[in-house]
Image (spheres, helix red, strand yellow):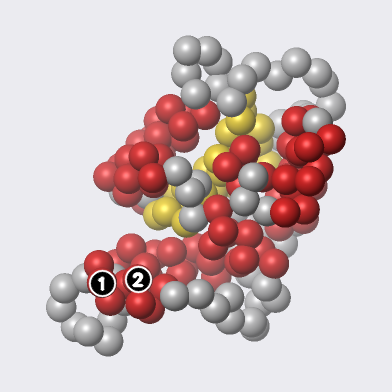
Amino acid sequence: MRWLIDGYNVIRRDPALSSRETESLEAGRTALLHVLATVAGTSPDTFTVVFDGARRTGGMASGGRVEVLFSRPPDHADDVLVRLAARWRDGAVVVSSDRAVRDAARRAGATVLGAEEFLAAIATSPGEDSGGDDEETASREKRGNPRRASKAARAAERARRRLHR
């Protein structure tokens, strides 16, 4: 499974990461990559983080199971995420709270998690319930058996569980 992460979107949804970003963009990126390296250490999956702009300084090498990509103008990170989602399709989980990215990733066949969902999932321990209103959201989006979550909700739950393997 490949996780495609909207870097700045995730940073700006977490108070700790966001406070690091106020120091500098580099500090925010480094803090996010440190969190992802910890998660990748316990997961067999590959994590690709996409940031806007060109890399200006060294120190953030891609490699291992956490890969860092920077969009090149005129493209934005959102464009890169959508292209990667189309390439990986159902083998990808796109992490972004940007509606356009989420919609395009779903159309490509990728599983989608909001930045807040992702942050909550990596903050909980394996046996804990991440809480949330997934059941309520799923019941509004689906047809059929009222006791079964939608296909998208089930895929998102499977993705969240993968973080704790």
* Residue at 62% from the left image edge and 38% from the top image edge: 8
**Which numbered marker is on residue 123?**
none
Q: Position of residue 5 (x, y in %)?
A: 56, 43
Q: Name which residue type carries label 1.
A: Arg
**Please, what is the three-letter code of the amino acid marked with disc 2?**
Thr
For the C terminus, give its image quadrant. bottom right
**In the picture, residue 101 is in which quadrant?**
top left
Instruction: State whether residue 151 is above or below residue 59.
Output: below
* SS for callout 2: helix
Q: Image point 54% across, 62% down: which residue?
A: 117
Q: Are marks 1 and 2 in contact (CB under 8 Å)?
A: yes
Task: Provide residue 89's location: percent of width, then percent of height.
Answer: 36, 44
As helix, strand or loop, the secondary structure at mark 1 comes to helix
Q: Which residue is mark 2?
A: 137
Q: Tell me what residue is drawn at x 28 percent, y 76 percent.
A: 139
The residue carrying mark 1 is: 140
Residue furthest to the bottom:
147
Classed neighbour count for the residue bearing mark 1: other residues with Cα under 10 Å, few (<14), some (14–19), many (≥20): few
Residue at image x 22%, y 70%? Answer: 142
Disc 1 to disc 2, C-alpha distance: 5 Å
Q: Is residue 2 visible?
A: no
